[in-house]
Image (cartoon, grey):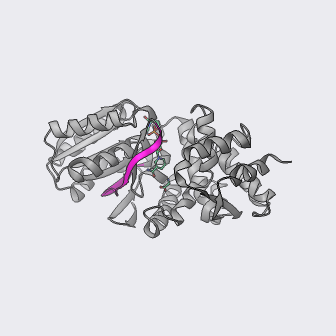
Amino acid sequence: MKRVKVEASLTYDVLIEKGLLKNAGKLIKETASGETAIIVSDTNVFPIYGDFLSKELKNEGYNVLTFVFPAGEESKNTDTLVELWEFLAKNHVTRSDSLIALGGGVVGDLTGFAAATFLRGIKYIGIPTTLLSMVDSSVGGKTAVDLKGGKNLAGAFYQPSLVIIDPDTLKTLPENIFSDGMAEVIKYGMINLPDFLYDLSRDMDICDIIETCVKDKRDIVNLDEKDLGLRQLLNFGHTPAHGIEKLSEFTVSHGSAVAIGMMIMTKASIKTGLCSGTVLPVLENLLKKFSLPTELVFSAEEIAKTALNDKKRMGANITLVIPEDIGKCVLKNVPIESLYEFLSEAWKK
Ligand code: NAD
Ligand code: GLY
């Protein structure tokens, strides 16, 4: 079993092993001493893994409760959050009990925020079941729900007590959702792991891929848990990606938008002399290998305008994540007015 220790405001383990769900009850018992375990999951994931996990927890003596909500980003909102709070209150959940997030990033973000706020904070344990949630959202304690005014606008930094990753659960994940996760995996390589980019271009074991990403995120979160500087590197490609997702009315998935966003940032950085030209074919080939799009969509003007609408509250400047070389990104603070001009470089021949 691979074990990655995160040492942020809370110290916890991220455990990675194929088949680990079998031991989830025992592992959770070592971390959560309360009487009740509340499984929070969605309508796609619970029918596949819910009963199995429930049985494992009961074998360890837990009283098990389940809260299952409709799958999808549309559920990551205050209505579901209030329903979950009321469910916990009605069932007399106490501070010594724990929430178990069984699912992808939507389940993890919502459960984490409920845990951060119910009774002013109870424990939660992540069992991520998408590649994106295994390599990114389950680690680092960003929890949130969406508001009508935008994604992730209400949330908290609140670390889990344990994360259990069983890559076998990826076997039931639709291929396109797996590819979405690969966009985030490639992002780690682009930010600061040149050798990993090379390894990804060959065949790599999924446990090694997940461990590499989790370790990298751990290192970043340990230094900048509250996202004040370094952690913003994890947003490589995300500023244009948010614009693309919104412009497409969310028909372009997050992973696809991040893939295109990374292409835009790389092309624009090369054109403006900030990045070595050798980076582009490495990125492009990897995205293609994992069935991710590489062609630019919409226009620089539309993307900049939409992305900035989202970022108005950030003030006069925006932090761009600029690739400089293979496996090396840096942060660059620029006035928001220069975003359009910068992005438009990506479209120039
Ligand atoms: P998701 O949770 O919606 O899962 C995608 C789909 O896959 C859903 O339909 C889900 O039901 C299904 N699914 C999940 N696991 C499955 C499995 N093993 N087998 C079959 N189906 C399965 O989406 P996601 O891509 O995992 O996460 C996206 C969310 O994560 C967004 O809300 C985003 O804002 C958030 N996020 C958070 C962070 C963070 O640091 N907290 C980082 C990145 C993304
Ligand atoms: N996914 C970006 C972060 O955790 O900061």
* Residue closer to the observer: 220 or 26: 220
Q: Position of residue 126 (x, y in %)?
A: 35, 50
Q: In the image, what residue occupies the spot 61% across and 44% down? A: 307
| Residue 204 can be seen, yes or no | no
Q: Quadrant of residue 52?
A: top left
| Residue 203 can be seen, yes or no | yes
* Residue closer to the observer: 6 or 272: 272
Q: Residue furthest front?
A: 316
Q: Quadrant of the N terminus?
A: bottom left
Q: Position of residue 239 (x, y in %)?
A: 61, 49
| Depicted 18 relative to depicted 88: above or below | below
Q: Position of residue 100 (x, y in %)?
A: 29, 46
Q: In the image, what residue occupies the spot 66% across and 51% down? A: 262
Majority secondary structure of magenta residues: strand
Which region of the structure is painted magenta?
149-166
Specify whether 124 is left or right of 73: left
* Residue closer to the observer: 59 or 322: 322
- Residue 158 lies in the magenta-colored region: yes
Q: Quadrant of residue 336?
A: bottom right
